Image (spheres, helix red, strand yellow):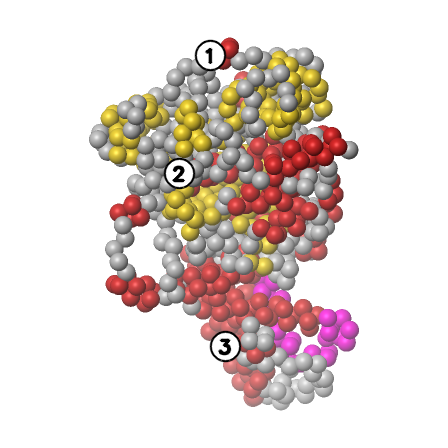
Amino acid sequence: MTKNMEKSKSRSNLGVRSKPARQQATSGDASQPLKMVKNQNGGDVNTSDQTQNRLSIKPGKIDSISGPLVIAVDVEGLKLYDMVSVGYAKLMGEVIELRDNRAWVQVYEETSGLSVNEPVISLQKPLSVQLGPGMLTRFYDGIQRPLDTIFELSGTFIQKGISVPPLNQEKAWQFTAAKKVGDQVVAGDIIGQVPETSLITHYVMVPPGVEGKIIKIADGKYQIDQTVAVVVDDQQKEVPLKMYQYWPIRQGRPYQKKLQSNVPLTTGQRVLDTFFPILKGGTAATPGPFGSGKTVTQQQLAKWCDAQIIIYIGCGERGNEMTDVLKEFPHLKDPKSGKPLMERTVLIANTSNMPIAAREASIYTGITIAEYYRDMGYDVALMADSTSRWAEALREISGRLEEMPGEEGYPAYLAGRIAQFYERAGVVLCAGGGQSSEREEIKTEDSKQDQTAAKSSRPKKSTQLTKSRQGSVTVVGAVSPPGGDLSEPVSQSSLRVTKVYWALDSSLAYARHYPAIHWLQSYSLYSEEVDDYNRNNFDYEYPELRRKFMGMLQEEAKLQEIIRIVGMDSLSNQERILLETTKSLREDYLQQNAFDEVDTYTSKDKQLAMLRAIWGFYEACLGFAERNSERLVSDVLDMELKNELAKMKYVSEQELDKIVSLPKQFHDEVRRIEQAGEDGEPEKPPLHMSISHLDTDIDQANGGE
């Protein structure tokens, strides 16, 4: 018992972000030493500047093996989270616990065939990713090994111990300098740029921990490991700069400060953009049972959201799902540029048949790559599918470490790990200065008039702030609770730290209503900020329609309870109109076909036109009921023109006039039906017992909501 408690105490520190002794290696040569410097956040960062003889490090040996967990003894020079080479096959492993001369290592590759007493060698560096041009369009595993290159070398199955450079070492990139000899630079400054794809320009930045005066820089074609600039620091030491840098995946990249954003991330999915929006730099969780559409929803976000860079992580999911992504993305066109979406996408896959320990690494690998592009000034969206598989990996490793389990066997630090992951999202003022990609200004004033007045009286900004870049990372994590039980620890821990909850409902999925996001169970804590943004930058009526329709959906749920008890005949004309309108809203607006060429994506302009059309139908029918209390409301509810609402979603963006004209057509058609009834003998309506009366003022009907 005492032994287990000691282990749990030693391991519990993993639930809090630690500061490993080495946080960055700026050279890809594993045979070079790591020099300790300070980054802007006060942590230690590594730079490599001279040759080190690794042969002087005495290797240890394997003492015991338990699945992906290996216990090694007598390994020299180890620190927590250091990488080690395990066995004669040189498997990649990471130190996750140290005690006396023993090290607990989680191995990121298959350990079958490994035996006791095989050597274990410290690599003297933390698990890091190589960040540079060439990552876009690539398909990596959880530890940033390019799977397409591995396929060429070892075939369908990944050979144990295989080591492949993450970036293309032979390709020559056209480097254009943004600085000149004699310029002073600090960490994060942009010194040049490379056309990574036809959509994305890759900005070459000064690595964290480096500052000084440029003494050499020139335009030209360079391979990834060639020096593009040389900086001399305060100690008169020359530091070569290359187009890439290394960064440890467990350590967040430095920035000046976090900012508050009110710019929504437009997804093209009507239920999300209208009712449950997310901001750029925000966080969202998508819990749902099996078959409810989590993967398709995340793929839709990856395809159509207006982020400039997409990082898609398949963590522990089925291999055929990632295969579908690989086959589909290269053929999809970006709605703004018309270029392939893959040109701004990085795919990371650790499928269910890959080593379970690498699931944890895949999450951190993805968020680190996202932060790197954020530091260039880009808006990045990261999709993690799913965080539950990552938590299962934590549970397995924790069990093999004999730690005291928490709820449902998950480690006690599960909530802390999930919080650390989502906290790396946000909008930031990037480190350094220099040019950046175009992005929308983050506004804090309430209106355009206030902005104009504020600018006239506002003091001039400093040069540093004017040159600084803003970037964002938006994180959307899918959660796969067993049996759809949202009370389990992963779902609850995710909901505690995210601000958007897209509740996938199995009953909607079984009814073939996709996206199966339940409008009464989901929520967004960004709604007020998005409403303010839409009023000032899009259309004042859009947030008002959103609020009114949400109130009608809530009222519909109450009326459905009454119908189940008393029956449909008990409803008033106004209530019948409400039910018919919300039915159209659910089926013609909230329901969206991801596999239809037109319906898969809906612009904000089309969303507004569709909402106005449905609201026009509601107002026209309600006016008829008020003017003709003795007439049957079914006369207008069954009008043939109503079928046009069902066809709206299939109207292309170039034909929006067909939708825009619908409100007027509904009012004209109702007047025509009303006039025809006046010319003939009106029917006597049946007696109605009104259970509840919906006031025509929607604000009053929803309690002023």
Res 658 seen here: no
Q: Which residue is mark 2?
A: 40
583 is higher (above) or lower (below) than 470: below
- Magenta span covers which residues? 561-588
Q: Amino acid at mark 2?
A: Gln
Q: Nearer the viewer, residue 212 or 678?
A: 212
* Horizontal and vertical percent position of residue 616: 51, 72
Q: Amino acid at mark 3?
A: His
Q: Let me know if residue 583 is in the magenta part.
A: yes
578 is higher (above) or lower (below) than 463: below
Q: Which residue is mark 1?
A: 53
1 is higher (above) or lower (below) than 651: above
Q: Which residue is mark 3?
A: 667
The quadrant the N terminus occupies is top right
- Where disc 1 sits, the SS reads loop
* Horizontal and vertical percent position of residue 236: 28, 24
603 is higher (above) or lower (below) than 686: above
- Where disc 3 sits, the SS reads helix
